[in-house]
Image (spheres, rainbow, N blue to C red):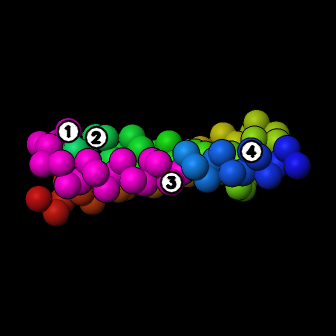
Amino acid sequence: MTRLKLYTAIYGVLFVSATVQVLVEGAGLAYGRALAIILALSFLKAAIVAAYYQHLRWEPRSITYLVGMGLLAALALTVAATYSIT
């Protein structure tokens, strides 16, 4: 039963985060500020999904660090692709 409560709370956090991302996109903020907010929220969501839904929270730290490096590489590629479009 504890897992159900935990996963429901995580789902709520992910849902609210996605909603905030959509609101930030439509808020008319400056491009750089909106990009920073959306990237930060995306990183947070990816970390939550990796930690709980992919069970990295209960894995040895070496595996968590390995996946974290891959996550940072994906984030760097996303930022590079974003700036190459403009």
Determine which residue is flagged by label 2. 36
Quadrant location, the C terminus: bottom left
Magenta residue check for 79 = no
Determine which residue is flagged by label 1. 33
Q: Secondary structure at mark 4?
A: helix
Whether label 2 touches label 1, CB < 8 Å: yes
Residue 86 against residue 73 in the figure, above or below: below
Q: In this view, which residue lies farthest toward the right?
A: 1
Determine which residue is flagged by label 4. 6
Q: How many C-alpha atoms fall within 10 Å of the one at disc 1: few (<14), some, or many (≥20)?
A: few
Please tell me which of labels 3 and 1 falls first in the chain. 3
Residue at mark 3 to residue at mark 1: CA–CA distance = 21 Å
Q: Position of residue 50 (x, y in %)?
A: 64, 51
Residue at mark 2 to residue at mark 3: CA–CA distance = 19 Å
Residue at left offset 58%, top offset 49%: 12
In terms of depth relative to the viewer, which is nearer, 28 or 37?
A: 28
Q: Position of residue 81 (x, y in %)?
A: 27, 60
Residue 19 against residue 43 in the figure, above or below: below
Label at residue 15? 3
In terms of depth relative to the viewer, which is nearer, 41 or 5?
A: 5
Residue at left offset 88%, top offset 49%: 1
Q: Which residues are magenta?
A: 14-33
Magenta portion: prevailing SS class? helix
Q: Point out the frontmost of discs 4 and 1.
A: 4
Residue 1 visible at all: yes
Residue at left offset 71%, top offset 55%: 53
